[in-house]
Image (tube, rainbow, N blue to C red):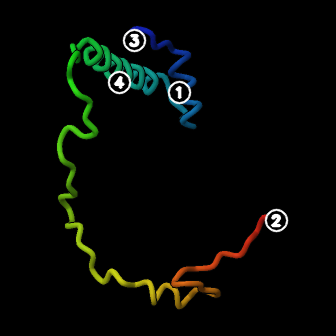
Amino acid sequence: MADRISDETIEYIGILSKLELDGSEKEAAKADMEKMLAYIDRLNELDTEGIEPMPHVFPIYNVFRSDEVVNGDESARTLANAPVQKEGSFVVPKTIG
């Protein structure tokens, strides 16, 4: 795949991204995309026969904060701003007939 990137493709990607790329930026973008596609080509060459798919390779944790509910029952304060309530929820008026 890496050898399939043309100058027209780079121009089109720039247009889609709403970027005005000059000549050196186009060359840098092309080089970056070629590196990414070469990496994908190498991944596609790996023999994955018999390997079970996994949703995540490693367990994902947010290392910047703990996932603990603090002051979790804010619903009464939130619902106090609701113009209409029903059974502890906002009532959204019907807008389409």
The Cα–Cα distance between marks 3 and 1, rounded to whole angstroms, is 16 Å
Image point (20%, 67%), residue name: 66
Q: Nearer the viewer, residue 6 or 45?
A: 45
Quarter of the image for the N terminus: give it.
top left
Mark seen at residue 21: none
Mark 4: secondary structure: helix
Q: Earlier in the sequence, mark 4 or mark 1?
A: 1
Secondary structure beneath label 1: helix
Of pointers 2 and 4, the one earlier in the residue sequence:
4
For disc 2, the marked residue is 97
Amino acid at the residue labelled 1: Ile
- Identify which residue, 77 or 20, lies in the foreground: 77
From what the image shows, is residue 63 above or below residue 9? below
Tell me the CA gap for discs 2 and 1.
42 Å
**Which label lies toward us, 3 or 2?**
2
How far, Cα to Cα, is label 2 from label 4?
51 Å
